Image (cartoon, rainbow, N blue to C red):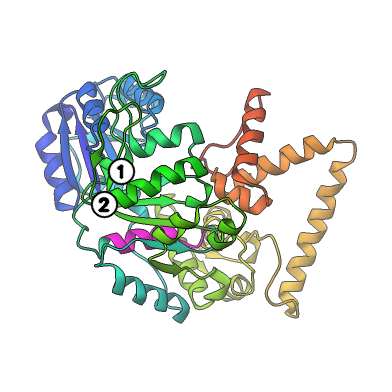
Amino acid sequence: MRLMIVGTLEGHTSTAWKIAVDRGAAVAHAPTVDDALKALRAGRGADLLMVDARLPVSRLRQNLESERIHIPIVACGIGNDARAAVRAIQGGAKEYIPLPPDADLIAAVLAAVAGDSDTIICRDPAMLRVLALAEQVAPADASVLITGESGTGKELLARFLHSHSRRASRAFVSVNCAAIPENLLESELFGHEKGAFTGAVARRIGKFEEANGGTLLLDEISEMHPRLQAKLLRAIQEREIDRVGGMHPVKIDIRLLATSNRELEEEVKAGNFREDLFFRLNVMTLHVPALRERPQDIALLAEHFARHFADVNALPQRRLKAEVIARLETHHWRGNVRELENTIHRAVLLAPGPEIGPEAIVLSGPSLAPDDAPARAVQAAEAVAAGQAAGGLVGRTVAEVERQLIIDTLHHTLGNRTHAANILGISIRTLRNKLKQYNEDGFAVPQPGEPEQVSL
């Protein structure tokens, strides 16, 4: 966990620094917004910015957005200054922490940001075998290709590899190749010099250099354009990269991890992925099983998510009823752990009492136990609901129905484009093009991380 404190925090910088360090964070300090931007452009990355509310938080957020630097911001100010809190939240801060800093509150914020840590919750033999193999190969510097369906936890396994490696004390940097447009991904990976293209207002260190000495994860690498695959292959072979607009190569020392929810060998045969790059990445392969292939983990994960989302939403703990567990264990889980997480989050919000019953569980898709009477009853109810909804399709154009389906699916995946594309059965490029058109037509499109709208 890398924390950057920006400003003086009303004179409480050293206190906040000590609290964060005691919670395991690596802390850096930037006196001003401009100093913070310079540090981030220079590759001194951060997972969270803790910013003095008296500084121009809005300008900081706008600069980060324009330069595609994605880091959450929390603002800090004197506790009774309501106007500063409102101004900071409106300016783009995710949270407002009153000063002087409270150790438990800062610890909670750090824990929320680091929620995708290397902790993997499992007890099913299928997943335990994967973890044992991961622990065995973690100390090496060899590239690892992590495969599995969308939502199974491939990035979580990558973080596990990093935290159990010799590079654990250095940076772990992740790039989602599917989430960044093709014309921007090269700069994101390799960096650029000032003036290299329109909008390049300053030199920007790319993810390869930011991860120098540590681990770089290329998430959903199968979505990378073949032209960039050639440049990536050279970077792996030569251990050096060229910034966009740069005159000299830059040496790098990283461990490379990659994930894919596609069969890369099939992508190679289809001409979508370079064979030589595939063999460079595929020194070691770890396959994360689908949730339906690790049934002993379903109840364990459901109970974990129930506790977590009760805490996050400041609600009392709610126990899952036995019939709910039974129903969850017979579901197909097409969206894997991510779908289970969203299902339990909804259930925590919808449950009317101290227990989570079947009425709070909203599922879609097939069951693994079609002969089970309760499951058949649930499927019948869902089918009736679906039929009622279908009646509303009459009189609408195919384009209108398609748009609604895509937007509803994005709500379901909390804005995750890759997951939505997989559910819809279309490519990520097709999805991006349609979303671009919807935005231009004035329709609201869920953004990544945007919570699903639940009617209570």
Residue 255: x %, y % from top left: 29, 56
Q: Nearer the viewer, residue 374 or 67?
A: 67
Q: On the rendered structure, is 102 left or right of 391? A: left
Q: What stretch is highlighted in magenta?
A: 151-162
Residue 70: assigned label:
none
Say which amino acid is labelled 2.
Ile
Residue 19 to residue 82: above or below: below
Residue 159 lies in the magenta stretch: yes
Residue 284 to residue 415: above or below: below
Say which amino acid is labelled 1.
Phe
Which residue is identified by label 2?
254
Q: On the rendered structure, is 215 left or right of 443? A: left
- Point 59% across, 44% down: residue: 428
CA neighbours of label 1 inside 10 A, class few (<14), some (14 to 19), many (20+): many
> Is the C-beta separation of discs 1 and 2 under 8 Å?
yes
- Point 60% across, 66% down: residue: 357
